[in-house]
Amino acid sequence: MQVLSAPLTQDDVLGVVSHLEKMANLLLMELKSAGSFPNGPQDNNSSSGPELNVSCPSLEFLLSENLLEKLYSWSEITGRYSNAVRLQQLKLYEQLVSHSRLQLLSHEPFLRPLLMLLTSSAREVFPLEVEKKLVVLLYQLCIALMQNVQLLDLFFSWEEGKTNFVLFSLLIPFVHREEGIGQQARDALLLCMSLSKKNENVAQYITQHSNVCPTSNLPLNLYISVMKQVLATGLSGLYSLLPRQLSVEGDDWHQLTPDDVTDLPELASFMNSLEFCNAVVQVAHPLIKTQMLEFLYQGFLVPVMGPALLQVTTSPFLFPL
């Protein structure tokens, strides 16, 4: 693939997208026929990863010719067609990650353009279709890392004294989203939280570096982390969207039912967030668990739930939330 200087046309982009779809289908056929990835132990000392089995010639060509990085470089000049090309790249990576049993992540010609694509997705606003595919890819990567913790450090970067765990940082904006995209993002974040028990770098990143602006060597419990900024305070925001009162039809009503939750989407969102916070406390590293409980108590229960529980109703048939 050559990076052309001439202006791109819609036909150029459609042609590349079509070729990418065909290439993905061919690669999946090869991986399935070869048993997803036929090689044995990986040589982690090799910059390009283990040698590929000859039964996957298309995959071997893809990596040996560095086509994925060339594709990423070309996508950078696609202008208004960039979202369409990014969507196809995300689809391709998601399919290969989910069918390759981890080994592809150890190949530099696969990993490097993948990390470039993920890093370039930070702080960008994409169409919903691109967002969904991004979250699917992140979820698949988290599953892969749960199966091989040794690969975790490949997804950390250290620049100018700042640490970034790209999977976690990309998932955070979706944590309070509704429907399938939000649920899958929360599932992926829970996998990251579980990884924090297995990898100290993940635990330290979540407690110290994610959304943190430290000014000195403060004790760990004085850092303002993503737990407070996103989870605990997000719970308060969702609570504020709940209706202030519920009108009931009879004096025998005494509790919220599943039907009530279904009829109140704001309540469903709040309950999803509350259940997610509870799940984080159950699976995360002890440092994260302690910090999370403190933030929930100081940032939600005391300032938000406390006054609400002490609120006085003026009607026996109106109940404050």
Image: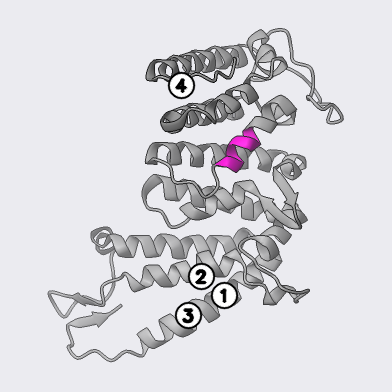
Secondary element at image label 1: helix
How far apart marks 4 and 1 lie (CA) works out to: 52 Å
Which label's residue is closer to the chain start, 4 or 3?
Answer: 4
Secondary element at image label 3: helix
In contact (CB < 8 Å): disc 4 and disc 3: no
Above or below for 113 versus 35: below
Locate residue 9, reporting x and y percent: 40, 19
Residue 160 appears in the figure: yes
Q: Residue at x 81, y 25 (%)?
A: 41
Q: Tell which tag, 4 or 3, sits nearer the viewer.
A: 4
**Res. 282 image quadrant:** bottom right
Are there few (<14), some (14-19), or many (20+) residues within 10 Å of tag 3?
some
Q: Which residue is mark 3?
A: 301
Secondary element at image label 2: helix
How far apart marks 4 and 2 lie (CA) works out to: 48 Å
Which label's residue is closer to the chain start, 4 or 2?
Answer: 4
Q: Tell which tag, 4 or 1, sits nearer the viewer.
A: 4
* Mark 3: amino acid: Leu
- 255 left or right of 58? left
Are there few (<14), some (14-19), or many (20+) residues within 10 Å of tag 2?
many
Secondary element at image label 4: loop
- 320 left or right of 120? left
* Mark 2: amino acid: Ala
Which label's residue is closer to the chain start, 1 or 3?
Answer: 1
Q: Which residue is mark 1?
A: 295
Q: Which residue is mark 4?
A: 7
How far apart marks 1 and 2 lie (CA) works out to: 6 Å
